[in-house]
């Protein structure tokens, strides 16, 4: 997550088009908002457009606006997304869903840096930073002839890849803490070591959004401050593998299908405990070290090894 954040900060300094690629729920929109917030355009609008959700017949008018009387029902002149995003960022979400007729018009707008309202004559200059996102392989869509190659190159100047959560399991403890904190606020719940280990072993096909859903359900289930493994509800089939593996681990019988390795398990437990102690000690390191029964030096060392800092 830190690597991703650093990449976002670097990219935010540039005005080149950014294409964010990642599985569903991996945090593409969040990354786009972060990019915008840290760019020179941060004080200007961020306009998010779900390209898959607009009926094709309305798209041109939604993107570029329309003059009064441009079509039946156009009672008033209206601006489109481009005008609304002027000086800011236009976020084209699910960009692979754009129909060919709009791809042409979008390309033209990006090349000319100006748009014309539907039914209008006048070109309006627009200055927008284009950030797009897709969970499909856009180059594959280009190969299949579904997506224009010239538009693809316009959008894909800088590519930002967000890895699936299962490929960055070391983020799970930190993400869980952040999300719980956001969901529960003053209640300040924490995850038991078992719960954390189960999360660490799960594959999260729905990525961070799924983690969020699991934690939200768990919060509703957990009777007290601590969320236990029993409060977590995974997709049934996957939960079985996770708990079977943990059970196996606890009983000491090495199962062939262990989906978690010991270092990752221990790391998750340690990370979770360190963060609980730090939070409880309101980030006084010496006090947290005392709670954990280790020296301040040891705490510092472990925090560094597990990439924990107060900022997180
Ligand atoms: N690093 C993170 N820290 C905290 N929350 C996160 C993080 N990354 C993602 N999330 C949360 O996960 C959820 C999904 O993120 P987001 O909507 O950005 O994903 P997405 O890739 O756009 O998903 P989709 O492909 O389904 O549109 C959001 O609620 C977001 O707040
Ligand atoms: Mg999204």
Image (tube, rainbow, N blue to C red):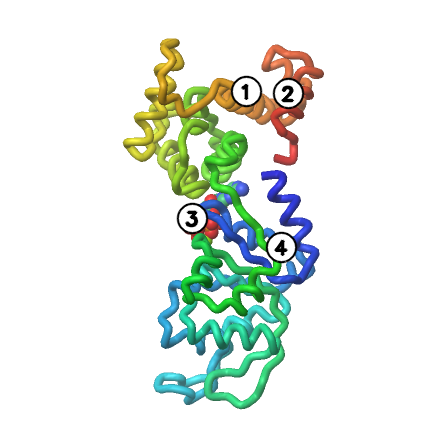
Spatial separation of the CA atoms under disc 3 and disc 2: 33 Å
Disc 3 residue lies near ligand 1 with CB under 8 A: yes
Which residue is under mark 1? 270
> Where's residue 157, x and y in %?
61, 60
- Circle 1 packing at 10 Å, graded few (<14), some (14-19), many (20+), is some
Marks 4 & 3, CB-CB < 8 Å contact:
no
Q: Which of pointers 3 and 2 lies earlier in the amino acid sequence?
A: 3
The 10 Å Cα crowd at callout 3, few under 14, some 14 to 19, many 20 or more, is some
Residue under numbered circle 4? 37
Which type of secondary structure does the marked residue at label 2 adopt?
A: helix
Separation (CA) of disc 1 from disc 2:
9 Å
Residue matched to label 2: 302
Q: CA distance from mark 1 to mark 3?
A: 29 Å
241 displayed left or right of 267: left
Residues marked 1 and 2 touching at CB (< 8 Å): yes
Which residue is under mark 3? 24
Query: Disc 1 or disc 3, which is closer to the eye?
Result: 3
């Amino acid at each position: 997550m830190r690597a991703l954040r650093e990449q976002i900060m670097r990219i935010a300094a540039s005005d080149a088009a950014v294409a964010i690629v990642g599985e569903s729920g991996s945090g593409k929109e969040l990354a786009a908002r972060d990019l915008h917030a840290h760019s020179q355009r941060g004080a200007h609008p961020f306009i998010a457009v779900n390209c898959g959700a607009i009926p094709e017949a309305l798209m041109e008018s939604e993107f570029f606006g329309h003059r009064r009387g441009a079509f039946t029902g156009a009672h008033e002149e209206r601006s489109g997304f481009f005008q609304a995003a002027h000086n800011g960022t236009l976020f084209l979400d699910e960009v692979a869903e754009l129909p060919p007729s709009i791809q042409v018009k979008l390309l033209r707008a990006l090349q000319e840096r100006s748009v014309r309202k539907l039914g209008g004559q006048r070109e309006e200059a627009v200055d927008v930073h284009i950030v797009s996102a897709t969970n499909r392989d856009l180059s594959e869509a280009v190969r299949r002839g579904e997506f224009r190659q010239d538009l693809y190159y316009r959008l894909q100047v800088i590519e930002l890849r967000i890895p699936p959560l299962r490929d960055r399991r070391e983020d799970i403890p930190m993400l869980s803490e952040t999300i719980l904190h956001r969901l529960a606020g003053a209640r300040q719940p924490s995850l038991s070591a078992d719960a954390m280990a189960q999360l660490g072993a799960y594959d999260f096909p729905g990525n961070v959004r799924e983690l969020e859903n699991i934690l939200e359900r768990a919060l509703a289930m957990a009777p007290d401050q601590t969320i236990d493994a029993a409060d977590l509800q995974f997709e049934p089939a996957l939960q079985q593998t996770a708990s079977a593996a943990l059970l196996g681990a606890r009983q000491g019988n090495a199962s062939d299908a262990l989906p978690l390795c010991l270092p990752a398990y221990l790391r998750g437990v340690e990370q979770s405990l360190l963060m609980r102690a730090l939070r409880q000690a309101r980030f006084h390191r010496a006090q947290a070290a005392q709670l954990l029964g280790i020296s301040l030096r040891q705490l510092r060392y472990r925090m560094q090894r597990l990439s924990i800092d107060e900022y997180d």
